[in-house]
Amino acid sequence: MTKVQGLNRLRWKYARQTFLPWKLALCKLLVGVRPMAVAYVLVMLGQLVLCALEKDQELLWRQGRAELQNRLRQELTPETYRALVDSGFREVHPNDALHWEFTGPSHSWSLMYSFTLVASIGYGDMSPTSDRSRLFCIAFTAVATPTLVVMYLGMAKNVMQIWHFFAMMMTKENILTFHKYDYDGSGQLDRAEFAIALHDLGYPVSEEDVDILMEEVNICDSSQVTIQEFSQALLLLEFPNARRQKVRLSVFLSAICTFVWLMIGTLVFTQLEAWGFVESLWFCWETLMTIGLGDYVPQTNAGRWFNLTYGFIGLGQLSLLLQAIVDLLTKHTSMLGRLEKRLMEGAQGAALQDVRKHHRNVKTRSSAEARIRDSKASLGSPCSPELKVAVSPSSRPSEPCSSEGWDPEGYLDDEEDEDLVCL
């Protein structure tokens, strides 16, 4: 058996042991579905309250619009009225379903509004008309929006973990490292094997740290660590190889997932809403970026239901992509900052060395002048040509002794200047 065949057998073995056991597969499914279920219940709660507050207001609005519509029909010619409708005047028919209705065929209108409200998309096609509804929206979004962000980020991370797993299975070092510490060949590391692996990789963690790490990476709260969870543990510990892999994979996989999701939404909306390709792509982008200009809004029941699922999953994917880009920019900025700091420290160090060298020269010259002054004082005579003191050329003052004194570039005090005058 060649090395490539042996490596492929290990890949298939760990993939089978990660996804095929029904308990583990069911646990992963529940972990993936739970954020979406919580988000749906949260959005539906907001829908229920808003429908109760806004339904009566919508009935009054429709009654007034119907009366206005009848008056316009009577006062305008059919051609003028048709031109008014074509320009954007919204007609009301008796059989039209209410938008603010919790049950019935128009259930998706209010549900989509509740979702766009919490997700801060806000198409603007529907809005609260009463003060009670506006106050509720303020309180509801203050609580629901952070919760929804946590939910769709959790959903996106679960999807990214699957992509990370398959990408990790293509890396030779990851498989061989995990296989090295899988002593019993079970495809999972128990607590003892996991601790030995961490110590051998250079992490002298305590028993308490091992328990905390296993609790953090364990998807199903079991006492075993799969190869996927082992890779996550290395990422948490910032293992050098795992750190480089994390940076590369996060950007690459996030970009691929976002692009694929944009294309899926574009193709689906072209079929459900009869939009063009660019129009559908623009709607998907402004939804995922929470721009929400409202120039395009799904009008079909199927389009609104698809938009709920599409927006929830896509918001998380795009958020992970933006976070990966920010991490790269932050890392690049920090590297530039460290480089600039080292350069500044080097420049300051060179300047400081020049200053110290200059001060040493000043001290040498001051010592030479002091010896000359002491010699003159001991002889009791003023400066004369006969006085000769052995002074080295390097320590000899650059200017002759004079009555004005000598101050090399102002480094000596005034009192020292007075002492340096010739006696």
Image: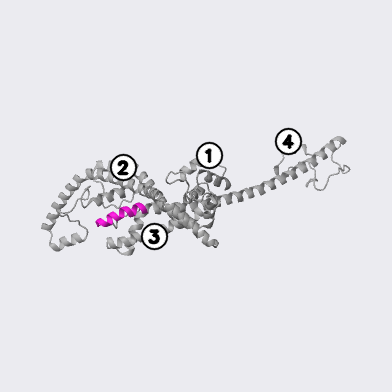
- Report the residue marked by disc 3: 260
Q: CA distance from mark 4 to mark 3?
A: 82 Å
Query: Which residue range is magenta in the image?
Result: 299-313
Alpha carbon separation for disc pair 1 and 4: 70 Å
* Above or below, comparing residue 303 to residue 370 in the picture: below
Q: To which quarter of the image does residue 1 belong?
A: bottom right
Q: Residues within 10 Å of mark 4 (few under 14, many from 20)?
A: few
Dot 3 amino acid type: Val
Q: Callout 1 environment at 10 Å: few (<14), some (14 to 19), or many (20+)? A: few
Label at residue 140: 2
Label 3 vs 2, first from the N-terminus: 2
Q: Earlier in the sequence, mark 1 or mark 3?
A: 1
Residue most toward the left? 74
Q: Amino acid at mark 1?
A: Glu
* Residue occupied by mark 1: 207
Task: Please state which of residues 388 and 390 is positioned toward the viewer in this rendering.
Answer: 390
